[in-house]
Amino acid sequence: MREWECRHTVRAEAIAGLDRLLDDLETDGQDVIITRSGRPTAIALDLERYREVQEALAEFADPDYLTQLLQARREIRAGEGIPAQDLFRERGL
């Protein structure tokens, strides 16, 4: 999610309305950027999103995975990819 797609709130509002902020994170799933003195200082996101981000960071830290991902991306852009329907059929999905 890009910064402009996040909800913004000031620190004082986040502290005063913490229960509401947590409820919103659960229901909306929208990240919240918390500012102090007009500057972004923190971000709040729901636990599932945090876990997804951590998993993605771990995958991207693996040089072999990243190499394979970039190679696949080049192949797709060159028109050498396998259509999803063919892949699903091949895998019995």
Image (spheres, rainbow, N blue to C red):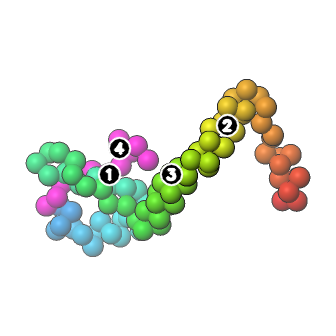
What is the magenta range? 1-12
Query: Which comes sooner in the sequence, label 3 or label 2?
Result: 3
Query: Which comes sooner in the sequence, label 3 or label 1?
Result: 1
Kindly report which numbered mark, 3 or 1, lies closer to the viewer in this rendering.
3
Read off the residue under disc 1: 7
Read off the residue under disc 2: 71
- Labels in figure, total: 4
Q: Residue at x 35, y 70 (%)?
A: 23
Read off the residue under disc 3: 61
| Direction from residue 92 to residue 37 in the image, left or right | left
Amino acid at dot 1? Arg
**89 is within the stretch colored magenta:** no
Amino acid at dot 2? Gln
Kindly report which numbered mark, 2 or 1, lies closer to the viewer in this rendering.
2
Alpha-carbon span between mark 2 and mark 4: 29 Å
Q: Residue at x 44, y 47 (%)?
A: 1
Query: Which comes sooner in the sequence, label 2 or label 1?
Result: 1
SS category of the residue bearing label 1: strand
In this rendered view, identify the residue nearer to me: 52 or 18: 52
How packed mark 3 is, by other alpha carbons closer than 10 Å (few <14, some 14-19, many 20 or more), is few
Amino acid at dot 4? Glu
How packed mark 2 is, by other alpha carbons closer than 10 Å (few <14, some 14-19, many 20 or more), is few
Read off the residue under disc 4: 3
